[in-house]
């Protein structure tokens, strides 16, 4: 028996081992999530340093998101081939190297390459905690573990931009890249002590196992890039280019699904040879997983879309300063962290569909209530912003600890890595689409109401355009509610 097998580590560390294992993957996931959100505060300084336009500078964020979204699909294959420890530690080294290389780079292409490397590492890491929670913890503890993990992970993006803004002011944009270094070093030390070297299920990793589905990965990557660029073109490019890119994305999606079905059938005919599909489409035969996947995608649209829209509304709609916006949103981030921990305990006792539905109702209400903020009542603007933002984050607190766990509880244990990978992929794809969707709808409503963003002063017409966009997000959450109610356990 390996000295780093689950049984040996459990014997060495006792009953607390599963919590030490959760802590180990939590630190690395915090580093990966922080690196995805914190860069936004450095984009203006970086574009000035490299004399870039806003569109080219924005690619340090877009490139990261695209790489992270696609690499999530490779997590099950990497875990089966190399085991938990090697996969996790390899990602931490890649994240560390990307941070150091990006911070020291003197050429923009090198900065962009470093961000893509960080995105690849972050994507592989993010499905791992849900796999560990579903395998290392009893069903009666899974909600609590998910809540504690979620609380730590949510604090990273809640506090990251505030700390990042301070670092940029004091030390410049390069300091943002170096922020992941201490987290990566800590996670590598923890991984060496507590993360097992086995594959999911406890069996030894098999470096000579099934080959990676490279064709599926290339189709997924090309389709994701076409979708993201097509949405960007809809916002500020030509209709023809947007139509070509979005049409290509649809064609590549159809090709990807057909390839995955063919690969799965070939694998079922010959279990001891061939290629494992990147996305096991048979998982969608489980109703809870299928409904959970729909909720995850729509939830990603609403979450990432609102993360983009709220600061833009406060700055360009209400005329608040950037630093003031961060201060207004900070209480909501802290409330979210606490709420996740509390709801995590409820998730062990309450049905998933109930918690997720409550969360979606609160999230939809927070978007709809943003339309009550008016320039004619300046004394109420900040208090209402704080209260409605907190209401939305409480809604997220109900969804986050329960959705992944509840959606995958019906899957067979050997399908859990694939399930976690697919749910995370769909959530991130929804998130990437959500940012563009909010930008497109906002631009359309501003034009329809004759309220461009060129003027310095805020106007009622401009606020009305933002109201329309918030109502669109509320409608999307209401749509997700239909799927959430079908997460109910079968009698």
Image: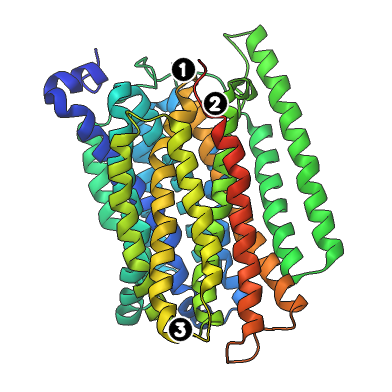
Specify whether 316 is left or right of 2.
Answer: right
Residue 354 is situated, as x and y percent measured from the top left of the image, at 45, 35
- The numbered mark, 3 or 2, whose residue comes first in the sequence reads 2
Judge from the rendering whether residue 46 lies leftward or rightward of residue 9; answer left or right: right
Residue drawn 53% across the image and 78% down it? 47
Q: Callout 3: few (<14), some (14-19), or many (20+) C-alpha neighbours within 10 Å?
A: some
The quadrant of the image that shows the N terminus is top left
- Alpha carbon distance from label 3 to label 1: 51 Å
In the drawing, what numbered circle is on residue 288? 2
> Of circles 3 and 1, which is in front?
3
| Residue topped by disc 1 | 414
Q: Is tag 1's residue or tag 2's residue first in the polypeptide sequence? A: 2
User: Badges 1 and 2: C-beta atoms under 8 Å apart?
Assistant: no
Q: How is the image coloured?
A: rainbow
- Pick the front one: 333 or 71: 333
Q: Which mark is residue 320?
A: 3
Callout 2: 10 Å neighbours few (<14), some, many (20+)?
many
Q: Is residue 426 in view?
A: no
Q: Secondary structure at mark 1?
A: helix
Q: Position of residue 342 (x, y in %)?
A: 28, 43
* Sequence order check, earlier mark of 3 and 1: 3
């Amino acid at each position: 028996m390996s000295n780093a097998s689950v049984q040996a580590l459990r014997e060495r560390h006792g009953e607390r081992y599963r919590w030490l294992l959760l802590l180990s993957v939590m630190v690395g996931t915090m580093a990966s999530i922080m690196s995805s959100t914190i860069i936004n505060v450095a984009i203006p300084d970086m574009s000035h340093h490299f004399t870039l336009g806003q569109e080219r500078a924005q690619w340090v964020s877009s490139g990261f998101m695209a790489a992270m979204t696609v690499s999530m699909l490779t997590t099950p294959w990497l875990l089966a081939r190399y085991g938990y420890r090697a996969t996790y530690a390899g990602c931490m080294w890649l994240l560390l190297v990307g941070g150091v290389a990006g911070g020291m780079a003197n050429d923009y292409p090198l900065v962009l390459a470093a961000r893509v490397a960080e995105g690849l590492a972050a994507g592989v890491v993010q499905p791992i905690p849900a796999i560990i929670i579903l395998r290392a913890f009893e069903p009666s503890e899974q909600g609590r573990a998910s809540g504690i993990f979620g609380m730590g992970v949510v604090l990273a993006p809640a506090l990251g931009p505030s700390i990042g803004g301070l670092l940029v002011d004091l030390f410049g944009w390069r300091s943002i890249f170096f922020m992941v270094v201490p987290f990566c070093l800590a996670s590598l030390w923890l991984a060496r002590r507590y993360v097992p070297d086995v594959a999911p299920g406890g069996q030894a990793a098999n470096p000579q196992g099934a080959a990676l589905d490279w064709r599926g990965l290339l189709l997924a990557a090309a389709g994701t890039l076409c979708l993201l660029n097509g949405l960007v073109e809809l916002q500020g490019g030509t209709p023809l280019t947007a139509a070509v890119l979005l049409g290509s994305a649809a064609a590549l999606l159809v090709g990807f699904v057909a390839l995955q079905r063919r690969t799965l059938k070939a694998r079922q005919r010959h279990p001891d040879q061939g290629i494992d599909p990147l996305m096991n489409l048979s998982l969608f035969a489980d109703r809870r997983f299928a409904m959970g996947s729909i909720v995850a995608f729509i939830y990603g649209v609403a979450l990432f879309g609102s993360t983009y829209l709220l600061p833009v509304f406060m700055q360009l709609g209400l005329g608040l300063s950037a630093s003031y916006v961060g201060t207004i949103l900070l209480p909501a981030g802290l409330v979210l962290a606490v709420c996740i921990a509390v709801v995590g305990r409820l998730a062990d006792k309450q049905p998933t569909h109930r918690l997720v539905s409550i969360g979606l109702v609160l999230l939809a209400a927070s978007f709809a209530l943003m339309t009550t903020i008016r320039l004619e009542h300046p004394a109420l603007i900040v208090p209402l912003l704080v209260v409605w933002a907190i209401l939305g984050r409480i809604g997220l607190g109900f969804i986050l600890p329960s959705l992944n766990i509840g959606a995958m509880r019906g899957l067979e244990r050997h399908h859990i890595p694939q399930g976690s990978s697919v749910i995370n992929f769909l959530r991130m794809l929804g998130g990437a689409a959500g940012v563009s969707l909010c930008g497109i709808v906002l631009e359309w409503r501003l034009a329809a109401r004759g309220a461009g963003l060129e003027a310095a002063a805020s106007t009622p017409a401009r606020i009305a355009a933002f109201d329309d966009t918030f109502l669109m997000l509320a409608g999307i959450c209401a749509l997700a509610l239909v799927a959430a109610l079908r997460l109910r356990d079968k009698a």
